Image (cartoon, rainbow, N blue to C red):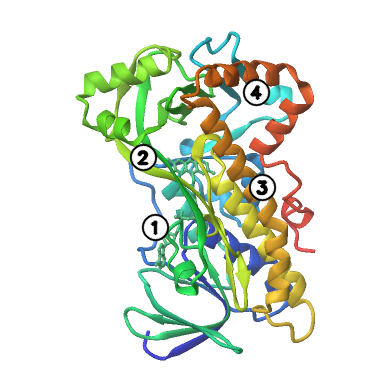
Amino acid sequence: MSAAVDVDVLVVGGGHAGLAFARLLAVLGGGRRPGLSIAVLDAGDAPATAPDAEVGLRVVALSPGSRTILERCAAWPLLPAQRVGPYRRMVVWHPAGAPDGAASIHFDAAGQGVAELGYIVENELLRAALWHAPGGGLQLLPATKPAALAIDADAASVSLAGGGLLRARLVVGADGHASWLRQALGVGAQHRAYGQHAVVAHLASERPHDDTAWQCFLPDGPVALLPLADGRVSLVWSCASARAAGLLALGIPEFEREVTAAMGGVLGGLRLTTQRAAFELAAANAAQYSGLRFALIGDAAHRVHPLAGQGVNLAFRDAVVLAQVLADHLALPHADPGDPLALRRFERARRGENAATISAMSLINAAFSSSVPGLSRMAGHGLALVDRLGPVKARLADMAMGRTGEVPAWVRRGSAS
Ligand SMILES: Cc1cc2nc3c(=O)[nH]c(=O)nc-3n(C[C@H](O)[C@H](O)[C@H](O)COP(=O)(O)OP(=O)(O)OC[C@H]3O[C@@H](n4cnc5c(N)ncnc54)[C@H](O)[C@@H]3O)c2cc1C
């Protein structure tokens, strides 16, 4: 690309957040402002159309609310059914007790009046479904790296590393937790390292996973086994960074023994079937989500501990709200998509839930992995208490399933209003 290209909205980052936002805006905003032009650039290549034979190492737990959003993006049908692992139960416990004893909490789909509590989906398949979803109105620019940003009264201009210039009335940062755009804007982020890494791998289990997400809160962090569609389980073991390095370095039989013991043998013996990898964990919240000609969504705006699998779910809700705020605004004659007052409505709507989730996850992680004598055990008793407190438990289930009132009617009904 050598000449300058003008668009109404430029999304930097074609990951889960950026693609969902662009698709939703094309659906809703395109109806209200015919000819609305939207481009999405990503530093990486376009995802492959056919999935790899091997199940990807990175998976996410999606809420039913996120499924509804993906259906509205026309992306859900592109996920191969044999690679989507629905889960119908969630069991969380403290190692002082047993998965079915005191100090545990149980959720099941039937009790919540739903068919599934959520779905385990590979990150790359999810991104591919959003990238290749049918529906026009989007210009997708893979392997395109931004190099410099300038914002003035008329446009946000992004110079590209390979030459060329993209000018937009609004630039949306969806380029992940190390967001280039957020840094180019000079927007700070409150950042807190947990001193933990998450070790991930897929394992075969002696006993069937029973479509259940299993999670045990060990003293240095939660360890979870998520049910994969092919019968295996996906491990997400959040633990002190030094321990994570040690787990990666262990021989395979020793690693298998450690994981089996960490989960209290809940699924019998576990056998490693893939590579292992580790990801650093941190919490972050950007000082601003919006301003003149910019908005930030997904991990570019906030980062949350994965213990309750909320990162993508929050990112999708950012995408819905920003698309709706913009579409409403663009219905006004001559409205400017980069208007900071309109964008502020998005920030006001989203900051509360994101901040509350970051704090709740940090608090849970700190309480269970506390070195304060007795605190972790007290948190374990708290689990049992919550399990018996109907309304509190129902509220937790609503949050986990993305039923917090954030999915508006135009997304649920599948018809733009
Ligand atoms: C171990 C682990 C387990 C998790 N489990 C869950 C879970 O179960 N459920 C859940 O909801 N969340 C989970 N999360 C969180 C989730 O993965 C993230 O919140 C989510 O992927 C964020 O999506 P995003 O689109 O904002 O960012 P990303 O997925 O990071 O996408 C960013 C995109 O921007 C592109 N990009 C980056 N830099 C540039 C640049 N300079 N220029 C152009 N493009 C760029 C990248 O190529 C990428 O495509 C987990 C996270 C971890 C670490």
N-terminal-most mark, 1 or 4: 1
Q: Is residue 148 above or below residue 325?
A: below
Q: What distance separates the C-alpha of mark 1 from that of mark 3?
A: 22 Å
Where in the figure is residue 180, as x and y percent of width and height? 42, 67
Q: Which mark is first along the chain, 4 or 3?
A: 3
Looking at the picture, which amino acid does disc 3 mark? Thr
**Circle 1 sits in a helix, a strand or a loop, which is it?**
loop
Residue 128 pos. (x, y %): 45, 55
Marks 1/4: CA–CA distance: 35 Å
Mark 2: amino acid: Leu
- Does ligand 1 reach within 8 Å of label 3's beta carbon? no
Residue drawn at the location 37% of the way across and 72% of the way down: 145
Q: Which label sits on residue 47?
A: 1
Apparent side of residue 373 relative to residue 52 in the rendered image (left or right): right
Of the two numbered discs 1 and 3 on the same chain, state the one appearing first in sequence: 1
Which is in the foreground here, disc 1 or disc 4? 4
Q: Quadrant of the N terminus?
A: bottom left
What distance separates the C-alpha of mark 3 from that of mark 2?
Answer: 24 Å
Sequence order check, earlier mark of 2 and 4: 2
Return the mark for residue 68: 3
Q: Secondary structure at mark 4?
A: strand
| Dot 1 amino acid type | Pro
